[in-house]
Each structure stands twice: as C-alpha cells, then as structure tokens.
Image: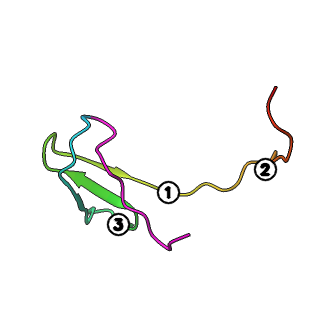
Amino acid sequence: MSERAAPFYCPYCGDEDLRPAELPEGGGHGAWECAACNRAFRLSFLGLLARGLTTEEPR
C-alpha cells in the first residue's frame, strides 16, 4: 500500500482536473481542489472496520 493516494475524479462533478489544495485554515493535508467546479474537498482515512476481513465466501 502506498503512503499517499490521489483521487481520480472530483466527488462533486466527476471531472479529473484535480490539484492539491492549500486551504486557508492551515490543515491542508489531504485537501484537493477541482478546477472544473471550483470546489475544494479533503480526503482522510478513518480506520479499519471492526468486522475486518472474513475468510468465508458470501452465500
């Protein structure tokens, strides 16, 4: 797994013209801006789910 992953498209408009953003509130880590719809958004990893991975196949 890589340390950082970049989004492939904007979650609002679906365009692919994304750039890392420097937000004014300081915490710019994981922030991106879309040139097409002029929106900024932040990505973050929340954690692993408690149920984890199972070895059983779904029925």
Three-letter residue code for mark 2: Leu
Q: Position of residue 13 (x, y in %)?
A: 24, 34
Residue 4 is one of the magenta-drawn residues: yes
Q: Which residue is mark 2?
A: 53
Quadrant of the rendered structure where residue 59 is? top right
Q: Are marks 1 and 3 in contact (CB under 8 Å)?
A: no
What range of the chain is rendered magenta? 1-12
Earlier in the chain: of badge 1 and badge 3, it is 3
Quadrant of the rendered structure where residue 18 is? bottom left
Q: Which color scheme is applied? A: rainbow
* Left/right of residue 56 with respect to residue 19 in the rendered view: right
Earlier in the chain: of badge 2 and badge 1, it is 1
- Which residue sits at x=86%, y=41%? 56
- Which residue sits at x=29%, y=43%? 10
- The label nearer to you, 2 versus 1, is 2
* Left/right of residue 52 with respect to residue 13 in the rendered view: right
Q: Position of residue 23 (x, y in %)?
A: 28, 62
Q: Residues within 10 Å of mark 2 (few under 14, many from 20)?
A: few
| Most foreground residue, 56 or 48 | 56
Give the Cα distance between marks 2 and 1.
Answer: 21 Å
Give the Cα distance between marks 2 and 3.
Answer: 32 Å
Q: Secondary structure at mark 3?
A: loop
Q: Which mark is residue 44?
A: 1
- Which residue sits at x=36%, y=54%? 7
Q: Which mark is residue 22?
A: none
Give the Cα distance between marks 1 and 3.
Answer: 11 Å
- Which residue sits at x=79%, y=50%? 52
As drawn, which residue projects farthest toward the right? Answer: 56
Q: Which residue is mark 3?
A: 28
Three-letter residue code for mark 1: Ser
Residue 29 is one of the magenta-drawn residues: no
Quick check: 29 above or below 9? Answer: below
